[in-house]
Amino acid sequence: MQAWRGSQSEMIDAGGRLVIPGLIDSHFHLLMGARALGNLQLDAATDLEDCLARIHNFAASQPQGQWLTGRGWRYALFRGAAIDRNLLDAIVPDRPVYLSAFDGHTAWVNTAALELAGILHGADISSDFSRVVMRDDGTASGELREGPAMQMVRQHIPAPTEEDDARMLRLALRELAALGITSVHNMDGDERQLALYRTFAARDALSLRIYLPLSISPGMDPQRIDEWIAQNADLRGPLLRCGCVKLFIDGVVESKTALLLAPYADGSDDCGIANYERAEFFRLIAHADALGQQVFVHGIGDGAVRLTLDAYAAAQHANGMRDSRHRVEHVELIDSADVPRFAQLGVIAAMQPLHAGFGYDEHNTWRRLAGPTRWPLGFAWRTLRDAGATLAFGSDWPVVSADPLRGIAAAQNRIKLDFSSFDSDFPDQRITLEETLAAYTVGGSYAEFMEHEKGQLVPGKLADLVMLSDDLFALPTAALSKTQVEITVMGGKIVYQRSTSKGV
């Protein structure tokens, strides 16, 4: 080390504290999360009364006549009852309100918002995947499921300016550096985002590395993928890279838009519905694969996971075998027959430890709708890893906290549900601390074809590293989430330093 020391070198004594590779969040929404920082946050609402009080107080603090937007409410607040616009009307009757659920797949809006969008009495939506939920009286309830329905209201909300986006991105980057995140795999991408990140990169203002896909939606011309590749051929990293596409094949369990192999456990015949017609889904993936693109597919239900694996197998058959490293994002449910297919097809399981909270609350909507027969293979980290799948962990920020240390703690402290009423034991899906850290470092780098550049602290790789306040391996699992980041280094430059760090 002394041979590299120059007159401008800064020497840092870690004082025996743990230094790990820079943390890679393999499922992220950077600009979406940055924008959300300026909105009402409802993640911490403990019940419906608390949620409504937070909305009322926020409304009182905002200028009259202005849209009220927020995010983060949880389905469990409603205890299985209908999502009702009248609850919002009672506290905010005079201006439109748009509140996204924590997962971004459902919106709760008031009457003013529905009237402004012209959908109080329903809407004709071409996609069966999305809908404006209606009441028996022929009016909209205030619940909008999935993107097309949500967009009918969202399009009337004043869009942020480029200056707004730049300001909020700067704020987000500061917060993320303090969490030890040095790379993100962004799960939505378009020309506007790319232009913003290019500007920040040119100004040396990015404190993390971004892997950005093209977002694909049903009906999109496959030639858009060709155009995206041509437009961004110069982006080969390591700070800003493309080379991937993102699709949604289903929604989420909580709104019954996840695609299941058998009906939901609520007594209905609903199995969810795919976001794409099978032929179009297969065609888009095969086209992207033929162009050498990595494919990310949001697949939550066991039916969605199977359909995605089938599409990847078809692409291999059509285009030939290659090191494609296609991915299934989330994998909240999987059928046992599909577990070995990840390793067989070389598909990566990109999962989020903080999503696996269904064991904590008996009123949890995911737990109720998935049903106990599916619980054993819910968020099946251990089962998939033992079957040879590569795990890449992330947060899905702003769906849950971006803090990877909380994610690491969640993977270690996951509750083992009582499965005594069934013939077999409930499998323990926890993985070890070493395996969890690997999923946030080497697994993340492998999942973006950068394992030779980052993810480990070895000579020749990028100088992305994090110094922690405590040695994770010396702590009881219950104390892991109390660990703090002392210093974050990205590309050899300190991008965050806690003021109380000793020995620095």
Image: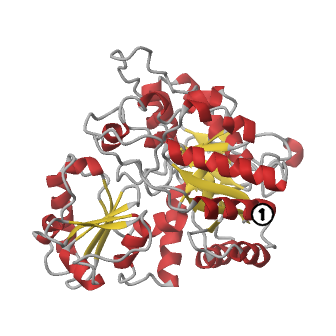
Residue farthest to the left? 90
**The image quarter in which residue 218 lies:** bottom right
Horizontally, is 391 left or right of 139 in the view? Answer: right
Q: Which residue is mark 1?
A: 237
Q: Is residue 478 visible?
A: yes
| For residue 494, above or below residue 191 | above
Instruction: Check disc 1 and give the amino acid type.
Output: Gly
| Residue found at x 57% / y 45% | 305
Point 34% across, 45% down: residue: 269
Residue 386, located in which quarter of the rendered image? top right
- The one nearer the camera, 131 or 12, is 131
Position of residue 433 relative to residue 347, above or below, is above
Report x, y in % for residue 281: 62, 61
* Residue 243 can be seen in this image: no
Q: Badge 1: few (under 14), some or many (20 or more) residues near its Cα, within 10 Å? A: few
Q: Nearer the viewer, residue 346 or 390?
A: 346
SS at badge 1: loop
Residue extending farthest right: 3
Way the structure is coloured: secondary structure
Q: Residue at x 69, y 60 (%)?
A: 285
396 relative position to 190: left or right: left
Q: Where's the C terminus, which quadrant? A: top right
Where in the figure is residue 373, as x and y percent of width and height? 40, 29
